[in-house]
Image: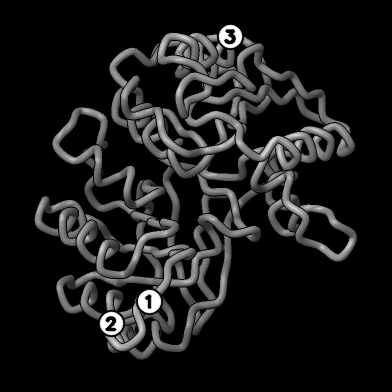
């Protein structure tokens, strides 16, 4: 079992019950759970002021833990990127610590990749994931837990999913296709866009870019994709892989068919590279873990897709 260090680098913990369930679940799975001293702190909407959260990241890097996890996402990392202890984080990764998170944690992951080239993991948070009550017995999502177990055991080799039929119709070449080794990178679309023009967005060419978001109407998703398109980010990739875009509401009688499939169709019309959908990652219970910054192969056979790093 693993030594897991939990910190709060972004927003403060709001759903205390879910957070406690997550801690309890990790302990029940046999892990040694170490909670940062300020994991439950509050300052405005943040889990402590900037200095407090930076100190927590430093303690996490020095913890010697097998895994460092976030309590939740929210907002707060972009404002402290210049002060991140990049050398300490990179050193901890060299020694075997796996840094795991999603949502606002994308800012940390992109900055670490840009500044050090080190690999982190896009994966679950303690509250929303391990504190989730998804299965019939009230436990978290079993696929998410299985993927996390693979990370702990060192058995994870890839993440597979079933492509929608529309993907093959749009890209007939995907029937039997694969990329050469390519850097996997990305995460939350809103956070990624906030880093354009800064030194914290990696300059990845020929990569596999994965994206997700929550509570963003399709027109806002398209606007952010347009920013990445006009900045030249998208055309430099070998493939774009879209995860979950959930938690939005269309406007009846106004959107008139302008939905996420329409956005995907528009994106494909702007690019000469494949745009795949359906990746089980984002703000949803079932999520795979993805090695951000690692070399992978993206391959498809019929409607079966696989991101392989083994």
Q: Residues within 10 Å of mark 2 (few under 14, many from 20)?
A: few
- Tag 3 and tag 1, C-beta contact below 8 Å: no
Upstream in the sequence, badge 3 or badge 1?
3
Is 217 left or right of 35, judged from the image as shown? left
Secondary structure under tag 3 reads helix
Q: Which residue is mark 3?
A: 62
Q: Position of residue 224 (x, y in %)?
A: 23, 57
Q: Position of residue 214 (x, y in %)?
A: 44, 57
Q: Quadrant of residue 180?
A: bottom left
- Determine the residue positioned at 69% across, 45% down: 148
Is 301 left or right of 128, judged from the image as shown? left
Q: Quadrant of residue 167?
A: bottom left
Q: CA distance from mark 3 to mark 1?
A: 46 Å
- Tag 1 and tag 2, C-beta contact below 8 Å: yes
Q: CA distance from mark 2 to mark 3?
A: 50 Å
* Front of the two marks 2 and 3: 2
Upstream in the sequence, badge 1 or badge 2?
1
Secondary structure under tag 2 reads loop
Is 183 left or right of 229, judged from the image as shown? right
Q: Which residue is mark 2?
A: 255
* Front of the two marks 3 and 1: 1
Q: Which residue is mark 1?
A: 250
Upstream in the sequence, badge 2 or badge 3?
3
Q: Quadrant of residue 36?
A: top right
- Determine the residue positioned at 32% across, 63% down: 240
- Determine the residue positioned at 62% across, 21% down: 39
**Observer-nearest residue: 101 or 219?**
219
231 versus 167 height, above or below: above
Q: CA distance from mark 1 to mark 2?
A: 6 Å
Q: Residues within 10 Å of mark 1 (few under 14, many from 20)?
A: some
Secondary structure under tag 1 reads loop
263 versus 80 height, above or below: below
């Amino acid at each position: 079992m693993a030594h897991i260090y939990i910190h709060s680098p972004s927003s403060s913990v709001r759903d205390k019950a879910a957070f406690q369930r997550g801690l309890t679940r990790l302990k029940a799975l046999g892990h040694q759970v170490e909670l940062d001293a300020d994991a439950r702190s509050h300052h405005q909407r943040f889990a402590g002021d900037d200095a407090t959260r930076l100190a927590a990241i430093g303690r996490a890097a020095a913890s010697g833990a097998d895994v460092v996890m976030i309590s939740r996402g929210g907002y707060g990392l972009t404002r402290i990127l210049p002060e991140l202890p990049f050398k300490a984080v990179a050193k901890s990764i060299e020694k075997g610590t796996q840094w795991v998170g999603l949502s606002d944690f994308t800012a940390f992951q992109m900055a670490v990749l840009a500044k050090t080239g080190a690999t982190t993991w896009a994966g679950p948070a303690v509250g929303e994931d391990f504190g989730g009550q998804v299965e019939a017995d009230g436990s978290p999502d079993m696929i998410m837990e299985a993927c996390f177990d693979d990370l702990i055991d060192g058995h994870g080799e890839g993440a597979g999913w079933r492509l929608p039929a529309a993907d093959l119709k749009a890209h007939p070449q995907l029937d039997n296709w694969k990329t050469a080794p390519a850097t996997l990178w990305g995460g939350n679309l809103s956070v990624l866009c906030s880093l354009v023009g800064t030194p914290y967005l990696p300059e990845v060419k020929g990569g596999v870019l994965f994206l997700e978001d929550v509570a963003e109407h399709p027109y806002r998703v398209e606007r952010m994709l347009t920013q990445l398109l006009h900045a030249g980010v998208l055309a430099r990739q070998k493939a774009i892989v879209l995860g979950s875009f959930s938690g939005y509401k269309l406007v009846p009688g106004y959107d008139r068919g302008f939905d996420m499939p329409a956005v995907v169709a528009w994106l494909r019309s702007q690019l000469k590279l494949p745009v795949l959908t359906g990746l089980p990652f984002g703000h949803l219970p079932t999520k795979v873990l993805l090695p951000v910054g690692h070399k992978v192969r993206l391959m498809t056979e019929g409607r079966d897709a696989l991101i392989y790093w083994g």
